[in-house]
């Protein structure tokens, strides 16, 4: 029997507001433990929450970008459970009236476009962090993260493979980055993902029993965890076993998921409306005002890049997938008119150097000005494309400008026929047999001669000119 | 002259004319506390030195001719659930013993801005859960009129302190009658303002949608004065309302001629205490004499108020009190083996029986499978109760009822019978559910010489009208000038 996985994702996006969701504490990452706290976020007696308006704006903005309907009437609820990282022992979240609902995003897998439903996106407060001591049998709590706004984005169970889940995450992250409402850094925890996954015989309509997978801390991790879990479930079913509804933790070292708690111990969160906050009522005008702040989103930008710069769909998708990269490219197009060449250089040389160094585009020492200066030197024949690769590597290494490197290393292309004439003549004289072979129809021999000229000029000869002059000389 | 026995309005004149100093006044009150509080047990904390220091500072400013606030130099005491930075606040619970406020709440901050002298904190039912002040971890406060009797609650310490002249003014909090019922039982004036009139920031929450801070005073004028100081929108409390605060003092003296006074027929209970019934009828006669017009009204959903209240209040309380877990502050149980054990032991040792009962009740009504039958239904009934009042207020300007169905009962009499105890709030609870303002004013003494209080209920944010009615009533009668004999 063939099985089909059914996957839904819950993504928590930490919103980068300056202050927390319900108090004015700072939200900076990496501050010393318990330095960004106050009576409100520590849950002291008598405190009251006050909603951060910016967080609401961000939530609505994100909802609009995810094609969601925006609730005219929404409210906060208390989700009750006891844990030391939750100061009030309830989390202020949204239960039945989220700010955003019924949206979707488009993903691309294997060249096919697919629409993935977004069930809802709601605001809630983040919890603190437990820090366990290895030496003493005790744990500490850092409340700096407590109360930072989270947008929980829940997908429909529309995903049918780990690859689709991966594509969904990439697309979602890209949208959120374009909105500039989160750092989207999975390692720092500003983007977190849990997955619900089940399997069912292909063709069956009903869903199978699902498990929830937590503790995945990279997109690759999600891909691997889902692949593992689907395999595990399939084997279980084939062997006549039953899937238990439970939460499982992904162990990235062992590449396996482990059972955390079963449904029997599942929480009853006892949700009820948060009486300390008033319902949020939004008018069409309020929503429209947020709508005016919607930036160009990845899909629209991709289309525009194809139209405006004549690059392929694939290239445009790569370039627009990362907002900063798209901005980098667009900056380059103002400084160099060979858009296709810019696109090729960014995708081959620039991204390779960045990946080797594990840095982001923002950290690249080669900025659009430096890159396009160099590309313009190729265009006007000052250096060859081949030399340019060396120059570029040097630029990335030192941060120096292309023309300085070219001058220092004497890499200017020889495009003067007079300078090349003697060298070409010398090569022909030194290789009579090869010349004969070429004349006899051996095309490869010609390239050998070109190579000899390039070698003699240490790669500086203008290759096109060499081709042309060699052909003329041999006749 | 016993300064402690005067009202704030009287004292303001003496202070303004420099006939007395604030230091003299504070000393007088402190002395009174020393001489009678052993009997009353109203205070859980008295900050003598700080109070004298504050008084001196205000005297100095007065001597310099600096502008001073409405309550300059006048002692105010706080219910032990109001936060005042660096002072102990315990809600009369073992779980918070040793906790010091980490900030100052809005109402207290407003007192400070008005240059009041804060002299200490007052006993209460644990976490404001109770109608007799008997659930306090410090033991019950005693009624100044008869020390074998309860003060009422939960703001029992506040009402008793005012009645025994142990403070000039006091703040209480009212979730189901916690200001009005003890005020009635101790023979003082107590007001629960409209929900949203006074910021709850810095009031330890019992039931967030019902709680409201309010003044407990010796006279209606003092009540208006203190309400003036603590009222107003606060950005730190999202449920406080942006509404102008009228000048209550100037509203007081307007006539109540032609005022339509609603008399709810559902409030004539079978088996109501005869003295209370008589005093209430008499009060209505007095209103007639003053030119007001009694109108019979109906509040048909009254009989569901107590059940509704005990679902909503306990549901909210079960979440509000979850934070007292010994992890960050307060008393943590020693020798806990693990996290669950820590929670269980801390809460088992820290909370008293009534608090535990209500947490369990609240947890139950919110539980999966019960939510719709209890919490959701209670919210619907709450809407009906609110509508009852809206309809009534189409016909009348205020509503008059008894505050408590009985005068003060004996300490220990009802503590083991929670359902009977809950009936103490039968006349007061609906107002909290509807968010309406209500004031309790003395309207007589029982055959056992225990005070009886009248409740006057107003439209939302119309504290002016009920203050005016209470003031006219007070001026027409001598009940407020009667004092218990202590010492």
Image (tube, coloured by chain):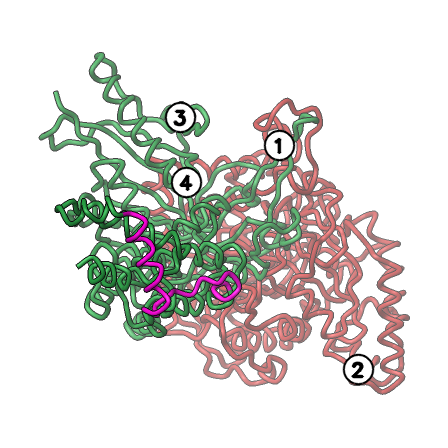
Chain colours: A green, B red
Assess whether mark 2 and mark 4 are in contact (beta carbons under 8 angstroms). Answer: no
Q: Is residue A418 magenta?
A: yes
Residue matched to label 3: A255
- Name the mark nearer the viewer: 4 or 2: 4
Q: Residue at x 58, y 83 (%)?
A: B251
Q: Earlier in the sequence, mark 1 or mark 4?
A: 1
Magenta portion: prevailing SS class: helix
| Quadrant where the image shows the N terminus of chain B | bottom right
Q: Earlier in the sequence, mark 3 or mark 1?
A: 1
When asked about the image quadrant of residue A309, the answer is: bottom left
Q: Residues within 10 Å of mark 3 (few under 14, many from 20)?
A: few
Nearer the observer, B16 or A164: A164
Q: Which mark is residue B13?
A: 2
Report whether mark 3 lies on the same chain as mark 1. yes
Q: Earlier in the sequence, mark 4 or mark 3?
A: 4
The CA span between labels 2 and 1 is 62 Å
- Name the mark nearer the viewer: 2 or 1: 1
The CA span between labels 4 and 2 is 72 Å
Q: Residue at x 22, y 46 (%)?
A: A445
| Quadrant where the image shows the C terminus of chain B | bottom right
């Amino acid at each position: 029997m063939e099985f089909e996985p059914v996957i839904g994702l819950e993504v928590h996006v930490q919103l980068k507001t300056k202050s927390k969701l319900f108090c004015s504490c700072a939200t900076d990452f990496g501050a010393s433990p318990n330095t960004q706290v106050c009576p409100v976020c520590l849950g002291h007696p008598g405190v009251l929450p006050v909603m951060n308006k910016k967080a609401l704006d961000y939530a609505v903005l994100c909802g609009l970008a995810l094609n969601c309907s925006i609730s005219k009437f929404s409210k906060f609820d208390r989700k009750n459970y006891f844990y030391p990282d939750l100061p009030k022992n309830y989390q202020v979240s949204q239960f039945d009236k989220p700010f955003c609902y019924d949206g979707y995003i488009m993903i691309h897998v294997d060249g096919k476009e697919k629409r993935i439903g977004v069930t809802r996106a709601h605001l809630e407060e983040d919890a603190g962090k437990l820090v366990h001591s290895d030496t003493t049998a005790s744990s500490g709590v850092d409340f700096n993260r407590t109360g930072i706004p989270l947008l929980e984005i829940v997908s429909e169970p529309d995903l049918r493979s780990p690859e689709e889940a991966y594509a969904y995450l990439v697309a979602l992250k890209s949208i959120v980055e374009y909105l500039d409402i989160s750092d989207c850094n999975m390692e720092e925890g500003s983007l977190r993902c849990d997955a619900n996954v089940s399997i069912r015989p292909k063709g069956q309509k009903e869903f199978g029993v699902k498990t929830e997978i937590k503790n995945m801390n990279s997109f690759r991790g999600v891909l691997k965890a889902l692949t593992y879990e689907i395999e595990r479930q399939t084997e279980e079913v084939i062997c006549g076993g039953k899937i238990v509804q439970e939460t499982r933790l992904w162990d990235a070292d062992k590449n396996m998921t482990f059972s955390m708690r079963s449904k029997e111990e599942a929480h009853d969160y006892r949700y009820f409306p948060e009486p300390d906050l008033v319902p949020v009522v939004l008018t069409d005008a309020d929503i429209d005002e947020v709508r005016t702040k919607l930036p160009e989103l990845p899909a629209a930008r991709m289309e525009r890049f194809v139209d405006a710069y004549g690059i392929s769909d694939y290239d445009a998708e790569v370039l627009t997938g990362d907002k900063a990269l798209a901005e980098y490219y667009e900056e380059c197009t103002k400084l160099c008119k060979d858009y296709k060449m810019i696109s090729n250089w960014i995708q081959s040389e620039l991204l390779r150097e960045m990946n080797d160094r594990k840095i982001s585009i923002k950290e690249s020492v080669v900025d659009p000005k430096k890159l396009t200066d160099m590309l313009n030197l190729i265009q006007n024949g000052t250096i060859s494309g081949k030399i340019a690769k060396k120059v570029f590597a040097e630029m990335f290494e030192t941060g120096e400008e292309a023309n300085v490197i070219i001058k220092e290393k004497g890499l200017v292309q020889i495009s003067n026929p007079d300078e090349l004439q003697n060298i070409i003549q010398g090569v022909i004289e030194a290789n009579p047999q090869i010349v004969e072979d070429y004349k006899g129809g051996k095309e490869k021999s010609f390239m050998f001669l070109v190579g000899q000229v390039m070698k003699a000029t240490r790669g500086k000869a203008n290759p096109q000119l060499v081709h042309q002059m060699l052909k003329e000389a041999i006749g | 002259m016993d300064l402690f026995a005067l009202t704030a309005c009287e004292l303001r004149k003496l202070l303004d004319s420099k006939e007395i100093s604030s230091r003299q006044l504070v000393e007088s009150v402190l002395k009174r506390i020393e001489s009678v509080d052993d009997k009353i047990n109203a205070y859980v904390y008295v900050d003598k030195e700080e109070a004298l220091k504050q008084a001196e500072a205000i005297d100095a400013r007065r001597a310099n001719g600096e502008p001073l606030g409405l309550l300059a130099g006048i002692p105010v005491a706080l219910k032990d659930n109001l936060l005042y930075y660096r002072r102990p606040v315990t809600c009369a619970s073992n779980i918070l013993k040793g906790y010091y406020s980490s900030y100052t709440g809005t109402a207290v901050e407003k007192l400070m801005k008005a240059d009041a002298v804060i002299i200490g904190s007052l006993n209460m039912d644990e976490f404001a859960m109770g109608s007799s002040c008997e659930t306090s971890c410090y033991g019950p406060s005693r009624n100044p009129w008869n020390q074998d009797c309860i003060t009422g609650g939960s703001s029992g310490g506040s009402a008793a302190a005012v009645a025994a002249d142990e403070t000039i003014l006091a703040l209480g909090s009212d979730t189901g009658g916690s200001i009005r019922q003890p005020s009635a039982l101790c023979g003082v004036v107590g007001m629960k303002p409209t929900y949203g009139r006074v910021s709850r920031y810095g009031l330890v929450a019992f039931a967030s949608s019902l709680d409201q801070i309010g003044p407990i005073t010796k006279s209606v004028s003092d009540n208006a004065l203190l309400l003036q100081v603590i009222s107003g929108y606060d950005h730190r409390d999202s449920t406080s309302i942006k509404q102008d605060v009228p000048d209550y003092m100037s509203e007081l003296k307007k006539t109540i001629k032609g005022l339509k006074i609603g008399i709810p027929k559902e409030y004539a209970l079978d088996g109501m205490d005869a003295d209370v019934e008589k005093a209430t009828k008499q009060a209505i006669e007095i209103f007639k004499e003053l030119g007001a017009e009694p109108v019979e009204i109906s509040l048909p959903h009254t009989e569901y108020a107590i059940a509704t209240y005990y679902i909503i209040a306990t549901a909210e309380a079960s979440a509000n009190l979850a934070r007292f877990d010994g992890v960050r502050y307060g008393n943590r149980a020693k020798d806990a083996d693990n996290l669950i054990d820590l929670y269980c032991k801390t809460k088992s040792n820290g909370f008293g029986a009534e608090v535990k009962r209500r947490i369990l009740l609240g947890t139950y009504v919110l539980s999966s499978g019960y939510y719709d039958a209890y919490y959701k239904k209670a919210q619907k009934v709450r809407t009906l109760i609110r509508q009852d009042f809206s309809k009534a207020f189409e016909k009348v300007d205020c509503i008059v009822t008894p505050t408590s169905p009985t005068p003060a009962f004996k300490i220990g009499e009802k503590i083991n019978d929670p359902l009977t105890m809950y009936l103490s709030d039968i006349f007061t609870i609906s107002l909290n559910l509807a968010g309406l303002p209500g004031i309790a004013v003395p309207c007589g003494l029982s055959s056992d010489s225990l005070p009886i209080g009248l409740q006057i209920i107003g439209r939302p944010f119309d504290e002016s009208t009920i203050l005016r009615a209470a003031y006219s009533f007070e001026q027409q009668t001598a009940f407020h000038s009667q004092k218990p004999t202590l010492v």
